[in-house]
Amino acid sequence: MSKIIVRGGRTLSGTVRVHGAKNSVLPILAASLLAEKGSSVISDVPALDDVKNILQVLAALGVYAQQQDGSVQLNAESLTSWEAPYDLVRKMRASFLVMGPLLARLGKVKISLPGGCAIGTRPIDQHLKGFEAMGAEIGFGQGSIEAKVEGKLRGARIYLDIASVGATENIMMAAATAIGTTIIENAAKEPEIVDLANYLNAMGAKVRGAGTGVIRIEGVDQLHSADHQVIPDRVEAGTYMIAAAITGGDVYVEGAIRDHLGPIVAKLEEMGVSVDCDENGIRVQASKPLRAVDVKTLPYPGFPTDMQAQMMTLLLVADGTSIVTETVFENRFMHVDELIKMGAEIKVDGRTAIVTGGMKLSGASVSATDLRAGAALICAALVADGSTEVGGIHHIERGYVNIVSKLAALGADIYRAPSPEDVLQESEEESLKPENLIKQMEQHAAASTEVVIRNIQPTLA
Ligand SMILES: CC(=O)N[C@H]1[C@@H](OP(=O)(O)OP(=O)(O)OC[C@H]2O[C@@H](n3ccc(=O)[nH]c3=O)[C@H](O)[C@@H]2O)O[C@H](CO)[C@@H](O)[C@@H]1O
Ligand SMILES: C=C(OP(=O)(O)O)C(=O)O
């Protein structure tokens, strides 16, 4: 298995650019299924494993997709299937977001139950409640869900018991072409919801109120393609802000949007970190000893659960004791045991973790159990004494583009040690590149000629 190796002790400085948001691009790519005419171009698409995965799901449904220089062109005029491939949906929860668009577009869908993951059971009851309210009949069998609707979905008033990001997105997409108006109450307010609404509206939808707790979607007959630029990734930005602060560094996070990062900016400032925001990014400077603070995760605009693990790592180097409360997912303290291996003192009691600051961290062999746990371990490794080996890096690569080279460019001593399988795959991929195939054919042809010449030489002699 590949690992990321970090030798701690370097102070980070310089500029790092944030990529497009994973949590925006996934629903946006799913929404492209709704375009009955034309090709959409989505730009600032991060080169992540999750993006590759959802593009494979779309391809299996008949979407023609072409990737080029951080953009993807998508044409969904002729869908060929209403079944989302089991293996791909099982691999990534966000692929469940094709359910709403497929129901709206084709009136039926078969998709596997996405299941839980390391951070919690993650049910989908709120998604299904929304589709049922809009007239869909839902059946379960052998780990999959089949849903269908007679004619078109119908607008409905839907109250979400939990302000679920995924349920809000799935229902918004299903409602875009429903007959009549849909009102989502207790809707999620995340910036990614607004980004999706902007794309849907560019496609001809009528979505109002995205970013508030009540979203109103007036159904239209049909949607068409539209071009859209994905918003910058606030979690990636927040992670680099923490990496800068933990090393006592001075880093400008280009592309970070202050309005999306309110709780991170506030908590860093409470700790004594200097944060300067302008229209192009955020500069983080940390030189004084940091103060302990309490943190409680909440839906947006509260402190994001996707930043909890990284923030906990920063609290390890602060003066004093901090309390971290996780309210969004029931099992999102998997990083704690790994941080303890590095010398951290953290006690977990249910959804609360008591973090003792000022402990000296030391390098260890640790493993990422999920994406943000992995990012937190890298942040810890940046200040640990000696060398840390982080395993399970496929989790990290789901959500961070080039994290190793970005941190190295800021001065970190970090590299990726590929597994033997990776080396083999890379060399196979390399040898399949057209220019290399041509070279191989030329070499082969030259070798054959040599053989022929050698073979005929004795005769000539
Ligand atoms: C691809 C994507 O955008 N992922 C983000 C999205 O995940 P996701 O959309 O899966 O998160 P949700 O907002 O749906 O989940 C929040 C909470 O609601 C619960 N729940 C959700 C749906 C449902 O039908 N029933 C139910 O009980 C979940 O188990 C969880 O405890 O928002 C999370 C919360 O900000 C982030 O951590 C994820 O990074
Ligand atoms: C939990 C996350 O993502 P996902 O919902 O894709 O698992 C995350 O981005 O931290």
Image: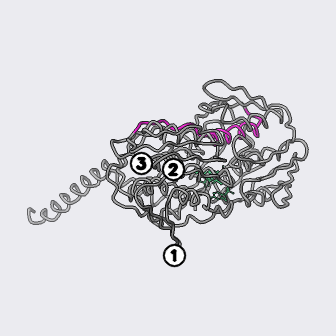
Q: Amino acid under label 1?
A: Gln
Q: Amino acid under label 3?
A: Leu
Which one is earlier in the sequence, the residue at label 3 or at label 1? 3
Marks 1 and 2, Cα distance to the nearest angstrom?
30 Å
> Disc 2 vs disc 3: which is toward the camera?
2
Task: State yes or no: residue 23 in magenta.
Answer: no
Which residue is labeled 2 in the image?
A: 155
Check the picture and name the quadrant holding the N terminus. Answer: bottom right
Q: Is residue 41 above or below residue 424?
A: above
Q: Residue at x 63, y 33 (%)?
A: 256
Which residue is labeled 3 in the image?
A: 34
Marks 3 and 1, Cα distance to the nearest angstrom?
28 Å
Residue 379 percent coordinates (x, y): 71, 46
> Disc 3 vs disc 1: which is toward the camera?
3
Magenta segment range? 226-249
Question: Please, what secondary structure does the residue beneath circle 1 have?
Answer: loop
Circle 2 crowding by C-alpha within 10 Å: few under 14, some 14–19, many from 20:
many
Residues marked 3 and 1 touching at CB (< 8 Å): no
On the question of residue 242 being in view, the answer is yes
Marks 2 and 3, Cα distance to the nearest angstrom?
17 Å
Q: Amino acid under label 2?
A: Gly
Residue 261 percent coordinates (x, y): 69, 36
Q: Nearer the viewer, residue 392 or 428?
A: 392
Q: Nearer the viewer, residue 71 or 364?
A: 71
Which one is earlier in the sequence, the residue at label 2 or at label 3? 3
